[in-house]
Amino acid sequence: MSRPRTPRRLAFAMPAALTALALTALPAFATSTPAQIATSKTNGVAHLKSLQAADGSYAGSGLSNEWAFSALAAAGTAVVDVAPGGDTTKNARTVYRDLISTAAWPSAAPVVTDYERGALNAYAAGIDPARVSASRNLIANIYGYWQTAEAGYFGPSANFNGTVFAALALGGARTRTGTTRVPQALTTSMVTRIRANQHNDGGWTYQKVEGNPTAINSASDVDMTGAAMAALCVSGVPNTDTDVVQAKNFLKGKLVSASGAFSSLYGVNTSSNGWGVAGLNACGINPQSAEFTTPHGKTPVDFLIANQYNPAGGFKYKPADTVPSAYASIDALRAVAGAGFTAAPPAPVTPGAPQWVAEPAFTPGTAARLALTVDDGAGNLRVCSVSLTPAGATTTLGDVLAAATSAATPSGCVTGVTPASGTGTVTSVNGKANSGSDTWKVSVDGSSFAGALREKTISVGDTIALRWGA
């Protein structure tokens, strides 16, 4: 399977029989205290800092530890403040930005989850994911995996996790001002697919089940249930929504009374608990509320903290383990800190270090990518990554649309524009013309839609949405 770079499970075996008990009268004190959580965060951050390589890196070939960035940010530590031996020239943010700016990253045969992972962790590190460098736009990279024949999916639909993490990245990695940068039409299409892949038991797995009654009736896993419910909630779905409530109830049904663990398809383990709690966190559902406190007075957060080595700070993958796991430590700390699958970067303490870094302009003559959606107002949404080589520090909407006719991935995003050159109002796109008050309008980085003018300035990393309507 193709999943984001997350903890590899020890085995794909069914867990031992661990019956989730119905909730009854609850003890008066059933949760980890704020002091315990604060200690867990402090010690967990110390452990994640110890995972940094001597060159300042967390990421490398194969499975790597850059998911630590989302955990560090959630726990209140800026990634730019994490440097080996205090050498700020090797701080984790700068090293990661340099890595993901290279043409060789992520690999010769990337998959969509590579870019989704990059966007979520760049955001947590304080790197604008759309403006990593003049040539690296992670939002546009994700757009390039849109499935035209199966609108709403990103990457092969059989690997449903690619669509879940697209929603997490596109909804969670917001602009530097906190605005959702993608249009509602795109968000709605992803939400529709996520809903269609919910199993009858209320959860999800990493595989597509839409249209397959047998698969829809199969058992869900805790991990992808946490991720999918988080994807719904970061997309604006309220936690009172029926599908979110069903997911919450699925997780409640997996509680192990004696420990507060979730009984996962991979056995009781810290990473699965972390993903389940992250889903609850993203939806604003308290994982230490009465409904997530077992008859033995345990919560999922209790289970996570019980599997942490203190004061060293690392977390075990399974309770019987005798050494900490990097991935379990990352998953657990992010969950204990109250985050979903990413977190906004905190203000750095390193003197002179900004909260955010972003490429300020195109480099003339350097190939770049931009994210573009075209919504004809009749339910025909086109999504693509547009390749172009700007002649200056900025470009224009007209030049982007011209490039989209021949250099878009997937192709067919724009087949024609009127007028085809010069300046002035865009009157027709893909054969659909303005009609009365129904005209083509444009939004950039989530701004309000306004009349589409060919001469409108487009800057590096802009996320562009065209829409026909009133």
Image (cartoon, rainbow, N blue to C red):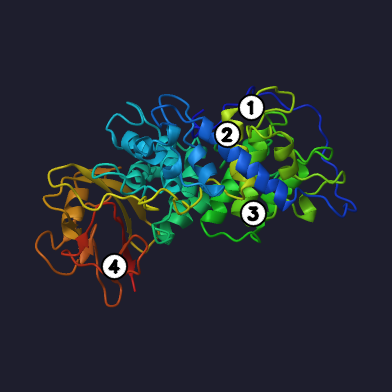
Say which of 201 and 459 sits in front. Answer: 459
Specify the amino acid type for callout 4.
Lys
Q: Is residue 358 above or below residue 303?
A: below
Q: Could you tell me residue 164's position as x and y percent?
A: 51, 44
Specify the amino acid type for callout 2.
His
Q: Residues within 10 Å of mark 2 (few under 14, many from 20)?
A: many
Q: Is residue 358 visible?
A: yes
Specify the amino acid type for callout 1.
Pro
Q: Which mark is residue 47?
A: 2
Q: Kindly report which numbered mark, 2 or 3, lies closer to the viewer in this rendering.
A: 2
Q: CA distance from mark 3 to mark 1?
A: 32 Å
Q: Of callouts 1 and 2, which one flags the residue occurring earlier in the amino acid sequence?
A: 2
- The quarter of the displayed image where residue 85 is located: top left
Helix, strand or loop for disc 2: helix
Helix, strand or loop for disc 3: helix
Q: Could you tell me residue 373's position as x and y percent?
A: 33, 55
Q: Kindly report which numbered mark, 1 or 4, lies closer to the viewer in this rendering.
A: 1
- The quarter of the displayed image where residue 317 is located: top right
Q: Of callouts 1 and 4, which one flags the residue occurring earlier in the amino acid sequence?
A: 1
Q: CA distance from mark 1 to mark 2?
A: 10 Å
Q: Residues within 10 Å of mark 1 (few under 14, many from 20)?
A: some
Verify CB contact (< 8 Å) between mark 2 and mark 3.
no
Specify the amino acid type for callout 3.
Val
Q: Kindly report which numbered mark, 3 or 1, lies closer to the viewer in this rendering.
A: 1
- The residue tagged 1 is 324
- The residue tagged 4 is 441
Quadrant, the C terminus: bottom left
- The residue tagged 3 is 244
Q: Residues within 10 Å of mark 3 (few under 14, many from 20)?
A: many
Q: What residue lies at 42% left-to-right and 48% top-to-bottom?
A: 123
Verify CB contact (< 8 Å) between mark 3 and mark 1.
no
